[in-house]
Image (cartoon, rainbow, N blue to C red):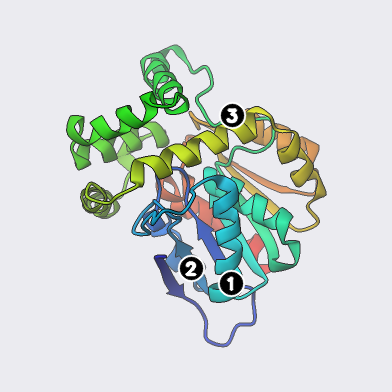
């Protein structure tokens, strides 16, 4: 299992912060915010099985399996209790772990996460985004279809270069792709090149996508977990998120008045990459109280 330790103050007793990437993401999703957050406490970012630099190695990549592995990571590497921060699918994984082992979790940060009442696929967009919506809707339909999803992802290795894969992700996850860091983009292209020769990556992606879709399509368990949480929660959401509408974050905030919420104007699905300063500004004072 691969992870990055961003360090932290040597004399702090504050719970460590563990960062969990989303579907198709990696530890690189956090490099624009982790160093600043490490000024307060130890910060670690992990790659889930089949993502980033962690090989699938025959392990399941469902959100439940990833939550169990996250629990082991917290107890064996980071040290419990820890504050968990998850982007997109990573928020679901963190929430599942918080529900399964609440004594190991000191707080929860959900960034662009499919909170109860939302969907892990695009909502109906403005007319200007309709072509993108059609493409994404077709992608998610293929992911959900046994056989078709496997062939689609396998063929993508030959249809798209690593740079094209990264550029497609930026177009989807950023409200304005021009805000992307050139250094992070180049690192992402290099990682995509490495992953082209890794075994099990397509299957891991599909297992994760299908399990996430099943959980949020039938969200009774998800809502029950969220309602049973007895720990501090911070929701950060981009108002121009194409994958998880900001309305879902507003509904979650209304249903859980004890949760803190930060909605970021003009920001998409990965605020920690698109607007890192705003994300650090939202997390830092909240984190200082944990």
Name which of mark 3 and mark 2 comes first in the sequence: 2
In the figure, is residue 217 to the left or right of 25?
right
- Calculate the distance from the C-alpha at mark 1 to the C-alpha at mark 2: 8 Å
Question: Which residue is painted at 34% across and 59% down in the image?
Answer: 53
Residue ranking furthest to the bottom: 11
Residue 266 in the image: x percent, y percent? 48, 34
Residue wearing tag 2: 44
Q: Which of 10 and 96 is in front in this view?
A: 96
Q: Is mark 1 on a helix, strand or loop?
A: loop
Question: Which residue is painted at 27% across and 48% down in the image?
Answer: 185
Q: Which of 114 and 67 is in front in this view?
A: 67
- Calculate the distance from the C-alpha at mark 3 to the C-alpha at mark 2: 28 Å
Residue wearing tag 1: 16
Residue wearing tag 3: 119
Query: Residue 58 — which label?
Result: none
Q: Is residue 140 above or below residue 184?
A: above
The C terminus lies in which quarter of the figure? Answer: bottom right
């Amino acid at each position: 299992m691969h992870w990055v330790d961003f360090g932290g103050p040597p004399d702090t007793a504050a719970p460590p912060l563990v960062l969990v990437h989303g579907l198709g993401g990696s530890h690189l999703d956090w490099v624009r915010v982790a160093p600043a957050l490490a000024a307060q406490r130890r910060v670690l970012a992990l790659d889930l099985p089949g993502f980033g630099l962690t090989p699938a190695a025959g392990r399941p990549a469902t959100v439940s399996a990833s939550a169990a592995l996250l629990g082991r990571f917290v107890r064996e590497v980071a040290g419990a209790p820890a504050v968990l921060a998850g982007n997109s699918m990573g928020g679901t994984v963190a929430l599942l772990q918080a529900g399964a082992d609440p004594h190991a979790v000191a707080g929860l940060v959900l960034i662009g996460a499919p909170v109860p009442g939302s969907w892990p696929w695009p909502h109906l967009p403005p007319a200007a985004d309709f072509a993108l919506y059609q493409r994404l809707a077709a992608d998610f339909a293929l992911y959900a279809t046994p056989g078709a999803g496997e062939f689609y992802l396998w063929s993508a290795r030959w249809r798209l270069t690593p740079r094209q894969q990264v550029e497609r992700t930026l177009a989807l996850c950023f409200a304005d792709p021009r805000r992307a860091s050139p250094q992070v983009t180049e690192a992402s292209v290099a990682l995509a090149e490495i992953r082209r020769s890794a075994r099990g990556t397509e299957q891991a992606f599909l297992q994760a996508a299908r399990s996430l879709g099943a959980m949020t399509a039938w969200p009774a368990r998800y809502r029950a977990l969220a309602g049973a949480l007895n720990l501090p929660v911070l929701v950060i959401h981009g108002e121009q998120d194409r994958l998880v509408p900001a309305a879902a974050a507003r509904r979650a905030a209304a249903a859980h008045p004890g949760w803190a919420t930060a909605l970021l104007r003009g920001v998409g699905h990965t605020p920690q990459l698109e607007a890192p300063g705003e994300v650090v500004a939202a997390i830092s004072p909240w984190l200082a109280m944990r």
